Image (cartoon, rainbow, N blue to C red):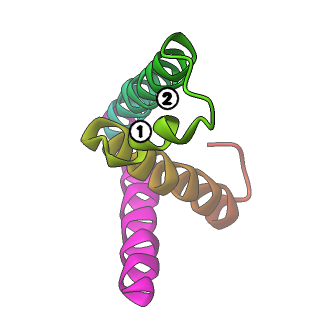
Amino acid sequence: MTLGVLLGTAAGGALLAWLRLKSRGARRLLDVAAVLAYLAFFAEAAHAVLRTLLDDTVFMTQVHEVLLSPLFMAGGGYLGVYALSLLAARAWTGTDS
């Protein structure tokens, strides 16, 4: 399972890096998707923390429910692959593309 996740992340990062380097339009689309993923990821995390604080949950284990949120997982997953693609694109070109 871990190997599959690592290989999928590497393949996704390589694909996004290739798209980033090949097309200016794709680069823009990937960046917009990253902004939306960041907003979703942050909003879900903030909502979980706020709900925990408002409910006065003593041990704060309720905040871990955010890990089950599809929006949180999709946003975090895309941000991981996106960050890897940025690093790969910079490594391949030697510039800040």
| Tally of marks | 2
Residue topped by disc 2: 45
Q: Position of residue 2 (x, y in %)?
A: 44, 84
Residue in the picture at 44% in, 19% down: 47
Residue 57, located in which quarter of the rendered image?
top right
Which quadrant would the N terminus be assigned to in this image? bottom left
Front residue of this view, candidates 55 and 47: 55
Residue topped by disc 1: 66
Residue 23, located in which quarter of the rendered image?
top left
- Magenta stretch, overall SS: helix
Residue in the picture at 40% in, 52% down: 77
As drawn, 91 above or below 40: below
Which quadrant would the C terminus be assigned to in this image? top right
Secondary-structure class at tag 2:
helix
C-alpha span from label 2 to label 1: 6 Å
Residue 44, located in which quarter of the rendered image?
top left
Q: Sequence-wise, which precedes: disc 2 or disc 1? A: 2
As drawn, 62 above or below 11: above
Taking 25 as reference, is 52 left or right? Answer: right
Taking 26 as reference, is 18 left or right? Answer: right
Q: Position of residue 83 (x, y in %)?
A: 56, 50
Label 2: few (<14), some (14–19) or many (≥20) C-alpha neighbours in 10 Å: some
Label 1: few (<14), some (14–19) or many (≥20) C-alpha neighbours in 10 Å: some
- Which portion, as a residue range, is magenta? 1-25
Q: Position of residue 42 (x, y in %)?
A: 50, 25
Residue in the picture at 48% in, 16% down: 55
* Amino acid type indicated by mark 1: Val
Is 31 contained in the magenta span? Answer: no
Cβ–Cβ below 8 Å for labels 2 and 1? yes
* Amino acid type indicated by mark 2: Ala
Q: Identify the residue at the far left of this view.
A: 70
